[in-house]
Image (spheres, coloured by chain):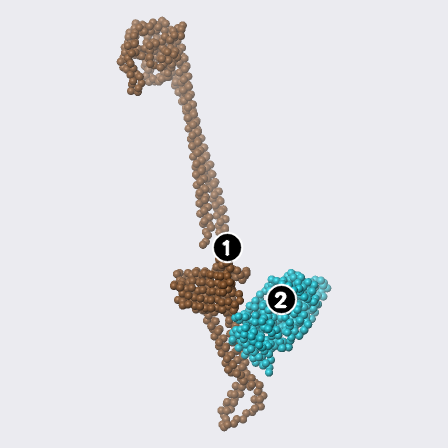
Chain colours: A brown, B cyan
Amino acid sequence: MQFRLVRYFTLASLGMFGLVALSLIYFERQQGDFFQRTGDEQRTFFNEVQQSFAQQQEQSARRDLLTIHEAGNVNLTRLFANALWDKDFAPFVAQVQMIDARACQEIADVDDDKGKKVAPPEKKACFTDLGKRIMALPDFKAIDAKVFASMKKSTVFKIKVFDLRGVTVYSSEHAQIGEDKSTNAGWRSAAFDGVPKSELTHRGKFSAFEGVVENRDLISSYLPVLDPGSSRIVGVFEVYSDVTPFLKQIQQTSEQIRSTASANQTKLEAAAVENQAAVDATSYRQFATIGLLLALLFAALLAIVRRAEKIIQQQEADRAHTHQQLAQSEKMASLGQMVAGVAHQLNTPLAFSQNNILMVKDALQSMELPMKVAGKLSSILEDVEGDKVTLKVAQLKANLDKLQDGNVDVSMLQEMLKDVLGGIDQMSELVVHLRDFTRLDRAATTNADLNKSLHTVAYIAQTVLPKNIELVEEYGELPSVECNPSQLNQVFLNLINNAAQAIDGPGRIRIRSLADDDKVRIEIQDNGSGIPEHVLPNIFDLYYTTKPAGEGTGLGLAIARNIVTEHGGDISVSTRAGVGTTFTVTLPIRLSEPLAKAA
Amino acid sequence: MKRLAGKVLCVDDEPGIVRSLQWLLQKQFEVFTATSGAEALELVKQHDFDVIISDQRMPGMTGVEVLREVRQLSPRTMRILLTGYSDMQAIVRSVNESEVFRFINKPWNIAELPKVVAQAITIAKTQPTDEDATDVSEEAPLVANGERILVIDDDPEMGRAVSELVGASARVSYTRNLADAVGILNSEAVSVIISETRVGSIDATRLVRLMKSKHPEIVTVMLTAESDADTITTLINQGQIYRFVPKPIRTGYLKIVLQSALRKHQALANDPALTFRHTVEATSAGTIEAFMSDVQKVAPQAEAAVADKAGGFMASLGAGFRRLFGVG
């Protein structure tokens, strides 16, 4: 399985970068939110402070106004009292005292719908009636005229005078004369405690000396009237003075402060917005920078990883190439070994056949003269009539040696040629087996008789193996097996060679085959040294070899397993030290999928 | 009766081969055949064979094993190993264990084989048997009588190893230059040559082969990391190598080889007739000339040449060749 380095790296690092970016954005946003919230809180606080400041300023201005006017009203009352009390009001009040108000006062108050004690209408009417009686007093008109005269063109809009019973003895607004003020907090403060009490009120409509005025801010002060020359309270004045212009001024100042505050607030807001923008901008720059840096990092890493992958691929290719070369050299090595064995196997019949033929040839050569002599003799005999032939012996005697040489044992020559024929048989047998082994002339995948294959491989192996290793072939009845016989031959030869290498000295290799349902099983069993325990787990590993460097490629069994696996089969091993090793190859009778075309 | 000139035993598991050899040799010699090592050894016990020819690859006993047994049972029997399969290990063992006379490849030369057998029979019948130095052990101290041993190897360690082994009992000359080697052989009576097959880039086996052909009393031991079967085959047939020691060398084994080589030399020196048992094949034509020209190329680097600035060394090298090999 191929490790997709670049892909995995890209996925992992992009994922990680994404997470980093998300968490950065999250924290940045948190920070932004916190900054905004803090800014908002600060602005709200500042706003409240300003508002409260403006309010306090207005309140204190109002309080000051009240205090100043109260003080003014006190003075005014004193002046008024000094001017009018002894001569005019004192006798008038004394006259009013004569009017009994108790009947009116005794009318009980009632709860209104809000639970507050209010005077019932009959009580009010009683006091109104009392007022009418006061106005009916003979001195009333004169006092009224004096009050109007002295208050003309002043900021005092109204004057009221109360006696110590709380009865309105005089009011510049005549309708109010006779009203009961005994429950009024201002009156009580002035009448009982001698403390002036003032109040700032706004009146939409107000009956003043000069007539009815509208939209006015008024300060009304309840002021105790002291008996001149003593500190005895003799009555209560109520003075209404107009502070509309002052209040306006105060309100203007207040307005100014408020607008300044508002301006400040606006500035602050603007600054905050600017700050926020700056912060946002910084944040974006930060994001951009980090993003850029991450991108650069990614690019650099990607370059490195790509380079690494290229190198890895190169190495992979090199390894594959080396493997291919090694597999090739393994194949060549086993081929070389096989060729050497075959050469030896051919050499033996070749040696005696050559020797015999050369000897027969020599013998034939030496038979030439005797044959000629015999031929001549036969022709002479043909021409002769009668019993006797005359031969010139001299010439024959001279060549007696040659004639004797030609006296060859023909049956021996026949024996020699018989051996030669036997040798030729051996050589053809070898050729047939070689052809069966390589099967270059057949289709790659075919239905093969594996017993025949095994016999061929055993025959070929025998040529290479030491002669003191016995090959025992025990074949069971096998169905034909769909396979690549050439590849399987390679596997069997490899297993037999391995088995032989495990045997030191004389030994035996058993080759067994048997059918097992839809499978066939082939066992190669040796009585060699067995496979050491520490070697066993690695024997099928690529490049694993126990042979010295340069002698084994460590590919033999790896390739064998590959071939068997490609056939949908299985190769297994069982071994016992000193007893031997058995390799078992199990193959399905039918291939489930076509074989790769590899050799 | 010339047919009974000698007794020859042919051993091969392939009946075709033994029959063929029998037909080839029976005209001149009395030929016995066996198709297994055990059968052969039985025959050796019953008969006094002059020559045994054995195939190497046989079931049961291998040829080398058969020849080793025959050497014990019948030391005077000349041993010839026959094989069509070049197996380095078998060759080395055939040299060291069986001291074979010849190594013959299948298919053999129909004209030559009877001649080789005839030569072996002549030697077996006429020459005494050399005593075998089998009683050498690693523990026993090395016995020598001041013989000269020539070590030729690229690795000076080899010279030192031999010097340490023999101590003061023998004189050791070490060289890495073949011209120096020729100079030493010319001026000293060398008893044992221990040589690597290649020195520098030159094939040193030619020196050994040439020396052996002219001076059979010299015992030769070859060292090599090489595994070229043909080189070794040539060394046996043309150089009668006494022992063949594959590198890396084990000191104990080297000591045994050295001791038996020294004894072998003593035996050969005491009874020159023995040397016939180590008769070699003629070296191929031109070998001496090619070897001379190679040696002359390395001569200027030789220690003797460096010491002798007058230039007399080259002249003496030529003289050495003439004296040693009778040419030049």
**Callout 1 and callout 2 share a chain:** no
Residue hosting label 1: A315
Give coordinates of residue B40: x percent, y percent. Answer: 55, 74
Give coordinates of residue B218: x percent, y percent. Answer: 66, 69
Give coordinates of residue A173: x percent, y percent. Answer: 32, 12
Give residue B193's quadrant in the image: bottom right
| Residue B174 showing in the rendered view | no
Left or right of A53 on screen, residue B317:
right
Give residue B245's quadrant in the image: bottom right
Disc 1 vs disc 2: Cβ atoms closer than 8 Å?
no
Left or right of B301 on screen, residue A93:
left
Left or right of A372 on screen, residue A49:
left
The circle on residue B14 is: none
Q: Secondary structure at mark 2?
A: strand
Q: Answer few, some or many: residues within 10 Å of disc 2's Cα (few below 14, many 20 plus, some between 14 and 19).
A: many
- Whether residue A564 is situated above or below residue B47 in the rendered picture: above
Q: Answer few, some or many: residues within 10 Å of disc 1's Cα (few below 14, many 20 plus, some between 14 and 19).
A: few
Tag in front: 1 or 2? 2
Instruction: Read off the chain for label 1.
Output: A
Image quarter in which the C terminus of chain A is found: bottom left
Q: Amino acid at mark 1?
A: Gln
Give coordinates of residue A134: x percent, y percent. Answer: 30, 8
Give residue A81's quadrant in the image: top left
State the CA–CA distance, disc 1 to disc 2.
44 Å
The circle on residue B222 is: 2
- Whether residue B34 is situated above or below residue A209 in the rendered picture: below
Instruction: Read off the chain for label 2.
Output: B
Q: Secondary structure at mark 1?
A: helix
Q: Which residue lies most toward the bottom here? A: A386
- Between A593 and B120, the residue placed more toward the observer is B120
Q: Amino acid at mark 2?
A: Met
